[in-house]
Amino acid sequence: MFYIGCHLSCAKGFLAMGKDAERIGATTFQFFTRNPRGGSAKALSEEDIRAFLELKKELGLGPLVAHAPYTLNACAADEKIRIFAKNTMEDDLQRLEYVPGNYYNFHPGSHVKQGTETGIRLISEMLNEILRPGLHTTVLLETMAGKGSEVGSRFEELREIIDRTERSDDLGVCLDTCHVWDGGYDIVNDLDGVLTEFDRVIGLKRLKAIHLNDSLNPLGARKDRHAKIGEGHIGLEALARVVNHPALKNLPFCLETPNDLDGYQREIGLLKSQRTE
Ligand code: FE
Ligand code: FE
Ligand code: ZN
C-alpha cells in the first residue's frame, strides 16, 4: 500500500477530512489539532469521530499525522510560553485518544539564545511530563531546517532528546524532506548516505512518517520554504527515489506543499505515477 496524502483543513471535523482525502485520492493525511497559531481547540463530536473511523476503515487509510500548532515552543526562555506548549500538547494527546494508533508530530522548538543543550534539556523535560502510561499515540519529533535557533536540524540533537526521555518507546521521528535538505543533508545526490546516517545516529526503526516537500532553496540554506513537487531544488526525480526507497516506502507520506486541494490531488497523482511497485 502506498500511503500518500497531504495536509488537510480540520475546520469541519474528522469526517470532512476523510471525505476530502477520498476525493483527492489520498490514502493518509495530516491535520492541525487546532488553529496552527495555538488557540483553543474545537469541541470533539463523538458522532463525527465514529463516522470518520468507519470511513477510515472502508478506505483503508494509513496512519494519520496530527500536527501540533507550529507556534508552540517547548524550549522557550519564558516559562509561561513553555507551560503553554506543555498544556496544549497534553490536551492534544488527550483528544487524540479518540482516534488511537496515530501520530502526533511537533517541532522540537527554538532555544532563543539559551543554546542547543538547554533547548534539548527543556524539550525532554516537557516530554517527561506529558508522556504518560496508557497513551495510544506515538509522538514524533520533526526534523527541522535549522532556521534561527531551531533545535532538531541535526540528527544528533533528536537522538539526545530521545535519550533524555524516559518513555522513549512513545517517541519517533518525522523526516521532512525540505527541512533535512535545508539542514544540509544531501538527499538528492546521496539518499542512501543520509538514511545510513539517520540509522547510525537515531535508528531507522524510529522513523515513522515523511513530510514530502520540495525546497525553494539550495542544500544547507536553513530557510524552510516549501516548494511544489518538482518545482524546487530537490526535484521530482529525487522525491520519486524517496517514495520508492525500501527503507521508506511503507511509511505515510504527507505533502505540505503550497497547494489547494486540486493542486494536492495533482501531486498525489504524480507521485502515484512515480511508484515502481
Ligand atoms: Fe511541521
Ligand atoms: Fe514538515
Ligand atoms: Zn517546513
Image (cartoon, rainbow, N blue to C red):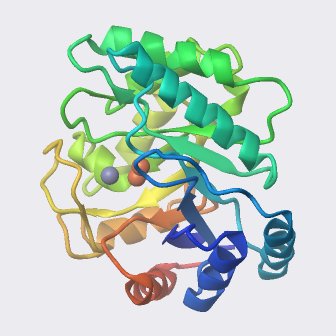
With respect to residue 125, does 18 lie above or below? Answer: below
Q: Residue at x 65, y 32 (%)?
A: 90
- Where residue 21 appears, x then y in whole percent? 61, 80
Q: Position of residue 89 (x, y in %)?
A: 59, 35
Above/below status of 26 relative to 175:
below
Residue 9 to residue 33: above or below = below
On the question of residue 32 being in view, the answer is: yes
Q: Quadrant of the N terminus?
A: bottom right
Q: Residue at x 77, y 81 (%)?
A: 59
Residue 68: percent from the left, percent from the top?
52, 45
Residue 111: x and y, percent?
A: 30, 20
Along the horizontal axis of the image, is 197 left or right of 172?
left
Q: Nearer the viewer, residue 120 or 235?
A: 120
Instruction: Looking at the picture, tell me which residue is in the foreground, 207 or 73.
Output: 73
Figure quadrant of residue 169: top right
Residue, x 43% and y 38% (percent of image)?
Answer: 107
- Residue 213 vs residue 123, the one in the foreground: 123
Residue 3 visible in the snapshot: no
Q: Is residue 248 depicted above or below 47 in this figure?
A: above
Q: Which quarter of the image is occupied by the C terminus?
A: bottom right
- Snapshot quadrant of residue 135: top right
For the image shown, how many numbered marks are present on the structure? 0
